[in-house]
Amino acid sequence: MSGLLSFVLWLPVAGALALLVLPRERVGAIRVTALATAALDFAVSVAAAAVFDRGHADRMQLVEQAAWIRSLGITYHLGVDGLSLPLVILTTLLTLLCVIYSWRVEARPKEYMILFLLLETGMVGVFVALDFILFYVFWELSLVPMFFIIGIWGGPQRVYAAIKFFLYTLIGSLAMLLAILIVYFHSSPRTFDIIALIHQKPLAQDLGLAVLAFWGFFLSFAIKVPMFPFHTWLPDAHVEAPTAGSVLLAAVLLKLGTYGFVRIALPLLPGAFQQEAGIVAVLAVIGVVYGAMVAMAQTDLKKLIAYSSVTHMGYVMLAVAAAASIAGRGALQGAAAATLGGATLEMVAHGVITGALFFLVGVIYDYRAHTRGLGDFGGLGLRLPVYTGITIVAMLASLGLPGLMGFVAEFLIFLGAFQIYPALTVLALAGVVITVAYFLWAIHRLFFGPLNTRWEVLPDMDGRERWALGPLVAVMVAAGIYPRPLLDMINLAMVNILSLLR
Amino acid sequence: MDLRPLAPELTLTVLGLALLSLDMVVPRDRKRVVGWAGIAGLLAALLVTLLPSVGLFGRPRLVFFETYAVDPFAAFFKIVAIVSAVLVLLSAMEFFQGRATLYEGDVYVLIVFMVLGLVLMAAAADLILLFLAIEFVSLISYVLAGSLKADRQSNEAGIKYFFYGAAASAIMLYGFSYLYGAGRTTNIYHLAQRVATFPPAFLVVAVVLVLAGLGFKVSLVPFHQWTPDVYEGAPTPIPAFLSVGSKAAGFAALLRLFYVAFPPQAWVMVLAVIAAFSMSIGNLVALSQRNIKRMLAYSSIAHAGYILIGVVSLTRPPAPDGSGIIGSGIGAVLYYLLAYTFTNVGAFAVAIAIERTLGSDAIPDYAGLSQRAPFSAFAMAVFMLSLTGVPPTALFFGKFFLFAAAIQNGFLWLAVVAILNSVVSLYYYAGVIWAMYLMAPPDGAGPVAEGSLTRVLLAVTVAGTLVLGIFPNAFVQLARTASHLLKL
């Protein structure tokens, strides 16, 4: 027993309460409090990682368990393994960077910071919760602050985007609630504990009902990921959200969906997932190719990056579906472990890379050019050398250049998936090619060619922006060159999850 | 004769009469004293309700020649009726602030008398007593709805409510006559032993006729048409009371009568279809409402539909120990009604405060409220999220238990209908939040005063809504205890 995870989980709420009592005129104190909270939370999550025994990353560690609603058998059960720990650190790091980046937000800074801290608790909670009701509460808790962040600080269409985001996610959440109840009523002894249910596999004998429950979970997770054809909320939400909101949306909130597939749908309902894996894989590949083609057609930089997320999440889902399709079969276990490990690494990598890309859009849009049209730029390379360098690194990482983080993840995904779904993987590789094309084209349109005279006086990135982006670039490069510590930890957890499928 | 089981009823009667006398001596501009006395008396009655003889924790039994049930189920509804009346009295005192009338004291007294009627409804074990209790509540409701004598809308609400109510009662009484004619008894528990011999079609006709009266009380489709007009026209604390107190007692009577006296096959499908229609029609019509009171009226119709899911889901025995009320239809209804009481009275309290300070019921006039009245706006946002069923609020667990009961009893389709409806309802509940938080206040609009009474009321209702959503343990146990409805 240790209170480390609880500390990481609830510290942001404590910070938000502290902000609540600060008078709204004391903007400086508000910013410092938010920064201190986010920084401390990040530090504690790193400390948790240091305490975490990476040699046994297949086990739940730092476990906390206490009665919450005794009469219903619902517990406060937290823990992390090699799957969730990297995502927790990703969350605390990006929240911290968002607070740094948002230093200059002038409109209602108090509410802004409170909502980001509450959002942090919601996101961390989803990754560490090991009880279904707790999981569900945090799942919904991450929804409400984002609704306000988009709705208050967003772009011109913010209200439409915020409500659409809320409606899509709520219908998914409620479908998941039904699925949870179906699983619960077939468990014996009755429990909401995720780990206990995974070991029980309550619906293993009743495939029809298991498939129904699977689609319930699927709807919820697929909307969050988002998978084609449930992705239509994403361009609106991403484009309208303020920069820091887009960053957290892309970097962390999308991962809640893929995390749900790996943590819950796969080990809890392996039979049903195996049966439906073909459909999931096809939807994933459609998402890859469709997302890439739509991204290619964008003239708005933020939309381009938003659609690139659809592609990258498609890779992850292809990998999860591939692993699910060979559930319980002896052969190809290695391929399944590789592709699933790649998928988890891709979650982290996409969080780091796309988080950085959305920051970079904000750098140019929020405080400099006030336009995101790719056609409006050109020749920025001479004017903004630091910005250009960082953006090119991030875009190359996103398109999967070897030596950067995205490559390792995508390589593992395709390596494993090819052995299981050769045809679909080849199709998905077409998406990779298109991705390379549109990112290179975007780099060309932004940074090369003649400088548009409108931008002759643009300043380069300032200290605050460098602080927000530096850590992400460092992670991209470091994990690209030497991914092993991270990958070993993830692989242990994946092998454990795959061993639970039998 | 042992009068101890009737302690709450006797307390309420004495309290009502005492307040009536008090009202005669209190001068016109100090009628609030009557309200405070009423609250004090109701809190005393709440303590009396917890006495062992009243049956919350005791053995279920029938008293007074088997006309009156003393069981945990009835005791629970006594608590709900008293708690909701206390909250409504607070909101009524807020409502009458600055608009003193000669009749203000009468409103407080009638609210207390209505509690007596609600308490009787939940415990009546005889059709005649049940009818008298329902009529007692209805007549007071008509008067209360029309109690702003100078206001034409209030008059319209009173008259309209009266005509609908009279028709509904008559139809229900006709249904009772079927039951008596064929069963030769007005006692619900004796009836239960004789309905087996009724022809099935005859029984269904009787059930539908009875449903007209009870459906009217809880505003179920198709007996709901009075709801929006009465909610809009009546003085705002009255619809607040109708939406929680009167609805809860209506469900109590419905549950006892149907669960005890009628075999499930005679009514379960009828009620399931009515539930689906109530949810869907209530939510779809609420989408286009611009007046907060009309929106809450349609929302109340939709919530009656949700609650009905719990009523139809009681054919299976309660779940085993360790799962509390998960899967139990009655438990879900009880928890939902308790949660709904705090949330909905809270929402009405904000509406009352805004109506009084801004003089408007229009949702667009809530624009920028988060900057003009931060506490009211926050409270309203909590209530709207609760009504949608988003955790960590009270009605999340309410809906959770209802869905669980539906799944456990083979009504998955009804749970799916409820889910689709919850998503629809988000749109109009979020519309209020959107106006308060996402729209800018009108130019030159200053802060809105939040009175101390409003603050107290909102603090209590927000606390209730959040505690039932975050630490529901004690309330789950209360609902579990109270789901012991006397059945022979």
Image: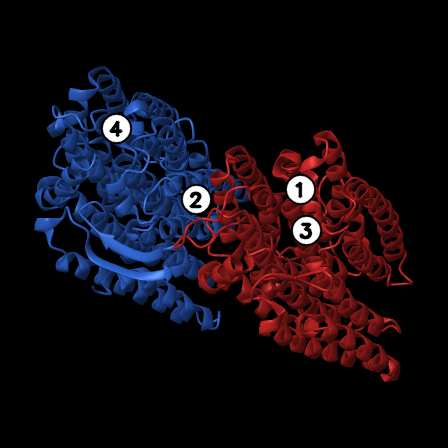
| CA distance for labels 2 and 1 | 69 Å
Q: Amino acid at mark 2?
A: His
Left or right of B457 in this view: A347: left
Does mark 3 fall on the same chain as mark 2? Answer: no
Position of the C terminus of chain A, as image quadrant, is top left
Near mark 1 (Cα within 10 A), the count class, few <14, some 14-19 or many ≥20, is many
Callout 4 secondary element: helix
Callout 3 secondary element: helix
The location of residue B2, given as percent across then percent down, is 69, 73
Name the tint of chain A in the rendering. Answer: blue
> Which is in the foreground here, disc 3 or disc 1?
3
Toward the top, the furthest residue is A423
> Which is in the foreground here, disc 4 or disc 3?
3
> Which is in the foreground here, disc 2 or disc 3?
3
The answer to whether the residues at label 4 and label 2 have Cβ atoms under 8 Å apart is no
Query: What residue does disc 2 label?
Result: A370
Q: Amino acid at mark 1?
A: Phe
The location of residue A171, given as percent across then percent down, is 48, 38
Q: Chain of mark 2?
A: A
The answer to whether the residues at label 4 and label 3 have Cβ atoms under 8 Å apart is no
Query: What residue does disc 3 label?
Result: B189
Query: What residue does disc 4 label?
Result: A440
Callout 2 secondary element: loop
Query: What residue does disc 1 label?
Result: B262
Does mark 1 fall on the same chain as mark 2? Answer: no
| CA distance for labels 4 and 1 | 73 Å
Left or right of A226 in this view: A40: left
- Sooner in the amino-acid sequence: mark 3 or mark 1: 3
Left or right of A152 in this view: B20: right
Name the tint of chain B in the rendering. Answer: red
> Which is in the foreground here, disc 4 or disc 1?
1
| CA distance for labels 4 and 3 | 80 Å
